[in-house]
Image (cartoon, helix red, strand yellow):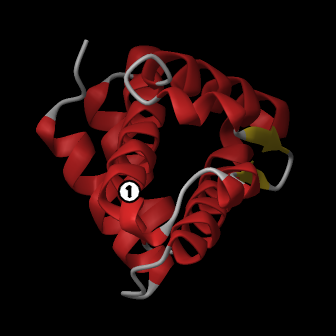
Amino acid sequence: MPEPDEFISIAQRLMDKSTSGQRTIEALISGLHEASRRYQVGLGAIVGSLGVQLIMARALKKVSSRFPYLKDLAIYEDGIDAHSLLGQKSDADYEEVRRGFESLLAAIIEVLAELLGKDLATRLVLDWVLKS
């Protein structure tokens, strides 16, 4: 099931905030880690660190068929590590990698929406993740 446009929009804003406008693979990798760390901090208070990791793992499973390179990502207590992509992707792949990362971040919201309802999940992400 594709993510609602609203979830993608939130994910794009989160990546913009986390990459500070830099357009390199390294910036995307750091940005994904920063964005996932924001999820950990904001949502960890509700579901705990392990709960956030499980939500991230479920989201990763949802999008990895569309973006196979995401299968190599690692989920840790402090966020998602995408450094395995450094040898696989170059700055020329920036847009593709960014779309994959945004889809992953949107899928995290989608999983939250499945658990908490769309309105509450969206509000939590907007209030806790984007504002932190």
- For mark 1, what is the residue? 98
Q: Residue at x 22, y 21 (%)?
A: 2
Residue type for callout 1: Arg
Q: Nearer the viewer, residue 106 or 101?
A: 101
* Res. 41 in view: no
| Left-right relation of 69 to 16 | right
Q: Nearer the viewer, residue 61 or 124?
A: 61
Residue 126: percent from left, percent from top? 36, 58
Q: Quadrant of the C terminus?
A: bottom right
Residue 24: percent from left, percent from top? 47, 77
| Left-right relation of 97 to 34 | left
| Left-right relation of 43 to 116 | right
**Which residue, as the protein is rendered here, is positioned at the far left?**
5
Q: Quadrant of the N terminus?
A: top left
Relative to 99, does residue 17 appear above or below in the rendering?
Answer: below
Q: Residue at x 37, y 23 (%)?
A: 66
Near mark 1 (Cα within 10 A), the count class, few <14, some 14-19 or many ≥20, is many
Residue 119: percent from left, percent from top? 26, 34
Q: Secondary structure at mark 1?
A: helix
**Total marks drawn?**
1
Q: Residue at x 45, y 71 (%)?
A: 91
